[in-house]
Image: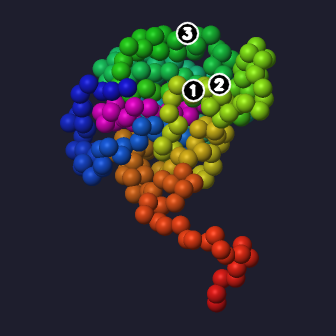
């Protein structure tokens, strides 16, 4: 994917100042975010939880806009988990679904203005029909955009994604009479909801919890993780840029050694050599 022109000049001055400090060729290709803390944000203000979600939707709008301005190719947001669906009161679930419908209706024009394409991952076929219809409408209305791909994880759980992948893969193994010992990581990857996407380089979680919460378990094997105490309704594009700045200070080794480090010559040493005191 390529963006035909840069829209960095559209960043507000505070965001532009951070962007200018970044190494442009080391901006991540894929940022994934666990949006957490809507309820706490509301609780701290003695407000009802739904107002926290409403303010959270505003954060989504702002972060998507910043992502599109910096030309981030992939942005994936954990908007509604399978566990949210099963374990939250029905009134809250139905409010979240209404909020999603409203968000899509009100933001398709803005997504088109920002060249953003929307898509979804998760067991979305289990969502209510009116929600699915609005989701399809938004995906269709933005399908020709070539900028940021905004992926909303909805009714999503990473373990059930793996179950779905294994079911699809075992169907393929049977049909093509493949040998189990020939199955590779790529075969599993090809059957994930995210098969067409690169793995996230950076995973951000708001509200300070040090958990992954069943999000993209396979895909984050080598992602850098950034946890901020900021609650999601207070999170804005500038905070994503700060996370990217922090990401650029890290060294990604994918299980290898740091650049420039030399391996010791240990061929003649017994494995139980004692460390000298
Ligand atoms: C966590 O807050 C967040 C969610 C349950 C879902 C995220 C939903 C939004 C940001 C709303 C709108 C989204 C879209 C795409 C329009 P929490 O309720 O778990 O917070 P808590 O842990 O403080 O209770």
Reading the chain from its start, which is encountered first: label 3 or label 1?
3
Question: How far from the left and from the top, in percent, is residue 132?
Answer: 58, 13
Tell me which colouring the rendered structure shows: rainbow
Question: Which-is-in-front pick, marks 3 and 2?
Answer: 2
- Circle number at residue 133: 3
**276, above or below 242, in the image:** below
- Name the residue tied to disc 1: 195
Count the marks: how many?
Answer: 3
Question: Is residue 69 found left or right of 275 in the rendered image?
Answer: left
Residue nearest the observer in this picture, 1 or 92? 1
Q: Is residue 57 visible?
A: yes
- Say if disc 2 is inside 8 Å of ligand 1: no
Calculate the distance from the C-alpha at mark 3 to the C-alpha at mark 1: 24 Å
Reading the chain from its start, which is encountered first: label 3 or label 2?
3
Span of residues in magenta: 62-81
Q: Is residue 157 visible?
A: no
Tell me the quarter of the image containing the N terminus. top left
Question: How far from the left and from the top, in percent, is residue 137?
Answer: 48, 10
Question: Is residue 229 found left or right of 62 in the rendered image?
Answer: right
Please report contact status of discs 2 and 1: CB closer than 8 Å, yes or no.
yes
Residue nearest the observer in this picture, 38 or 202? 202
Question: How far from the left and from the top, in percent, is residue 221?
Answer: 60, 45
- Residue placed farthest to the bottom in the image? 277
- Name the residue tied to disc 2: 191
């Amino acid at each position: 994917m390529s963006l035909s022109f840069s829209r960095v000049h559209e960043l507000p001055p505070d965001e532009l100042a951070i962007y200018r400090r970044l190494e442009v060729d080391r901006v991540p290709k894929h940022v994934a975010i666990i949006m957490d803390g809507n309820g706490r944000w509301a609780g701290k203000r003695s407000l009802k939880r739904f107002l926290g979600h409403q303010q959270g939707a505003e954060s989504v709008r702002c972060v998507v806009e910043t992502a599109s301005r910096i030309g981030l190719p992939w942005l994936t947001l954990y908007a509604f988990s399978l566990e949210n669906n099963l374990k939250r009161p029905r009134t809250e679930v139905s409010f979240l679904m209404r909020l999603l419908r409203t968000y899509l209706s009100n933001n398709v024009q803005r997504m088109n203005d920002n060249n953003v394409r929307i898509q979804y991952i998760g067991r979305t076929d289990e969502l209510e029909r009116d929600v699915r219809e609005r989701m399809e409408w938004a995906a269709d209305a933005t399908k020709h955009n070539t900028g940021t791909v905004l992926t909303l994880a909805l009714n999503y759980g990473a373990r059930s994604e793996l179950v779905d992948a294994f079911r699809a893969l075992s169907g393929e193994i049977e049909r093509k009479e493949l040998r189990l010992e020939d199955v590779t990581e790529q075969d599993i990857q090809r059957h994930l909801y995210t098969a067409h996407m690169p793995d996230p380089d950076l995973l951000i979680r708001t509200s300070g919890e040090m958990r992954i919460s069943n999000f993209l378990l396979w895909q984050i094997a080598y992602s850098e993780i950034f946890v901020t105490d900021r609650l999601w309704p207070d999170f804005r594009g500038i905070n994503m840029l700060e996370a990217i700045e922090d990401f650029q200070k890290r060294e990604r080794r994918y299980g290898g050694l740091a650049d420039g480090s030399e391996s010791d010559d240990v061929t003649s040493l017994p494995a139980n050599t004692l460390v000298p005191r």
